[in-house]
Amino acid sequence: MFCFTMGERGQRRRVNCCWMAGILFLGFGELVSAQLRYSVPEEVQVGSVVGNVAKDLGLDISTLTARRFRIVSGSNDALFQLNQNNGVLYIGKTMDREELCDGIKVCLISLKIVVESPLEIHYASVEITDVNDHSPTFPESEQRLEIAEHTPPGTRFQIHAARDPDVSTHSVRIYKLSSRFFFDIEIRDSEEENTPFLVLKKPLDREQKAEHRLVLTALDGGSPSKSGSLNLTITVLDANDNRPVFSKDIYTVSLQENALIGTLVIQINATDLDEGLNSDIEYTFGKTQKKKVQDTFELDSVTGEIRVKGKVDFEDMEMYRIDLQASDKGHLPWTAESRVVIKIKDMNDNTPYIEVTSLSNIVPEDLKPGTVISLISVTDRDSGVNGKVICKILGNVPFDLTPSLEENMYSLVTKGRLDREVVSHYDITITATDCGEPPLSTVKTLSVQVSDVNDNRPLFSQNPLELYLVENNGPGASIFSVNAADNDINENAAITYHLVRGDGLLRDMASFLNINSETGDISALKSFDFETLKTFQFQVVATDSGTPSLSSNVTVHVFILDQNDNAPVILYPVSSNGSAEGVEEIPLNVNAGHLVTKVRAYDADIGYNGWLLFSLQEVTAHSLFGLDRYTGRIRTLRSFTETDEAEHKLLILVKDNGNVSLSATATVVVKLVEPREAFAAADVKSATKDDEDNNVTFYLMITLGSVSTLFLISIIVLIAMQCSKSTDCTSKYLQETNYDGTLCHSIQYRSGDKRYMLVGPRMSIGSTIVPGSHANTLVLPDRRGTSTQV
């Protein structure tokens, strides 16, 4: 309990404050609730201090402005103001207690105070205490009473009650009568007010005094007290000496609210022992009856029936107390008083009302479960079970309502993880249903937008990627394009690309590539040669623009495809000066089909680009010599005659099978000699030929060894990559096959659903492709039937 004192207009007025606080923790969000209570007199000057709310709540004054320290109580916040600089609650406008809380003993003004970051809601009640600022007043300045003579002493006559809007000790406390010889004042206590009655002390004698004039003074309990007066004029009547009597002093009845107009509430009954006009009774409302009663009910003066006249609303008034009078019609009428208490039964005629204090309608998707995003308050003007409200959320949404310490207060919290990529907007439907019969409900929809956070990394549609690039590409031209997708939006989905530049071969190859950071287009800075490089790989990294940024990479396997960019090379015949010319001497007596020589050629390309065909371009005698187009062997077509020339020149064209064929030519000069000279020349030539063949074989071994090594490494890398990517990746080679032709080789392999064939130089007659050797083991026979391995 804390007590504060404040000065006002030279006087010291005491303001009492008591507070109690409760704290509720909701999941990961914190909602603090506290209850404060202050008291302040009415009519206090605007700006007067009520209390220091921030200090009583233990809040840091320096953070009040940043935390939006404020009152959110609706219409009541105009009566009071909060100073965000020091946390003081002060009077916002002059308050009249009688205007704010007419007829209520304790006048409480409820305030709802909110601070944010974290969210706290506090409740403060300010009691407006009464000051003696009103004097008792009577509804009329004069009241006339008619009292028959022979009226027995002790008879009571109801007179106007004085009303003082002040309460408690400042209300009407004492009634004084100017003369108490014949009359006295008696007070009947009731729940609402004290009703004065004029009591006859002595019998009246009209003949002695027909009229009595008295002054009734009402005084309140203030210090100093205030007063009001009523002039009483009492006329003494003669005769009728029996008054009506009600069957009950107090009638009690129940009536449902919203009763139809004309509904019978109750019928009262009074009897008079007199006869004739003196026993005819007329019923009327009490003279001091409130206007609200007369607007709601009507009384039949003859039958005593009370019926509904206006709207009966439990929420406006729960109970009516009606003062009634029954008067006879004698010359000197008698009057009796009674009271009817009508208790209104509540009906479920008010739907609940939902008030939403939305803190933010945009929430990030990484919000933790249990975080408070809005405050919900529910009210129902009905009472009892009709005013009990059940609040819930419709549909399957990741939100929940958590009850607060304050009745019918809820916090809207998250109950699950939010994912903007799945649902970006929620319409949260809140229903409030009372427990009446039939139940009434209200629906409120709260829209919540889920904002994006960078929680998705860029993804490539496939990893790894394969690129088949034809050799001799143009430097600087685009060779490939990569694309990644990000499920986030805005800057979180803005993707940039860059190449991974590491050590070794990967760094070397990446240094010859360039990538457009925005589009992902990849261009080569150099032209690639299949005969030098068969395959390589590099990595591309895609990075979004979120904070912090997320990234992913993809490996690109590049396979260089062959083009027909190498012309055939003549291996034999080769003269001493390096030209493709040779001289062959054959005996004159050879038969048809004799092997003159074989033209050997090689093409560095593979496949059809390296498949060589031979043809005779020029020959002196077409009938003497024939050329095998696939093997390059030159044979005699018939035996020689004496008329045949002794020397013949053959021009052989060697060309590949590329789309644009490349070719080379060789010249063979055939000399016809006598058989003995042929053998002698053959022996000399054989020795020379052996030396030449040894040199040719040596260079051929170096050339084929280099090409075979590179080709072997490329095929092994390709097979390893395909096997690592797919479990069904297989590599199949051709069966052992004999070829009769030029230097050409081929390999078949399978990668996934694709089938590839790599073709190299074909073999000569009698040569074989050894399985597993990648067709690089070549056996070349010489023209005498012996073979030399290269």
Image (tube, rainbow, N blue to C red):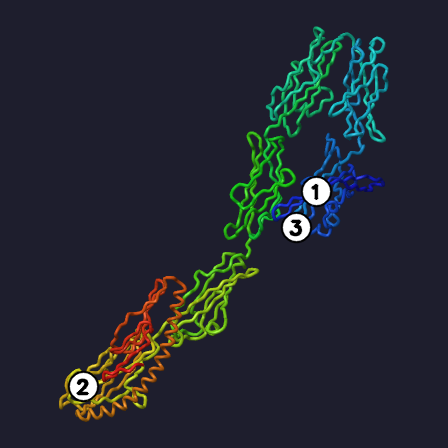
Amino acid residing under circle 2 = Ala
The residue identified by callout 3 is 117
Inter-mark Cα distance, 3 to 1 = 19 Å
Q: Earlier in the sequence, mark 2 or mark 3?
A: 3
Q: Earlier in the sequence, mark 3 or mark 1?
A: 1
Q: Quadrant of the C terminus?
A: bottom left
In this view, the mark in front (2 or 3): 3
Residue 120: percent from the left, percent from the top?
Answer: 67, 46
Inter-mark Cα distance, 2 to 3 = 108 Å
Residue 556: percent from the left, percent from the top?
Answer: 44, 67
In this view, the mark in front (3 or 1): 1
The residue identified by callout 2 is 621
Amino acid residing under circle 1 = Ala
The residue drawn where x is 50% and y is 71% is 502
Amino acid residing under circle 3 = Ser
In this view, the mark in front (1 or 2): 1
Q: Is residue 489 left or right of residue 707?
A: right
Residue 331: percent from the left, percent from the top?
Answer: 75, 9
Q: Residues within 10 Å of mark 2 (few under 14, many from 20)?
A: few
Q: Quadrant of the N terminus?
A: top right
In the picture, residue 581 is in which quadrant?
bottom left
Q: Are marks 1 and 2 in contact (CB under 8 Å)?
A: no
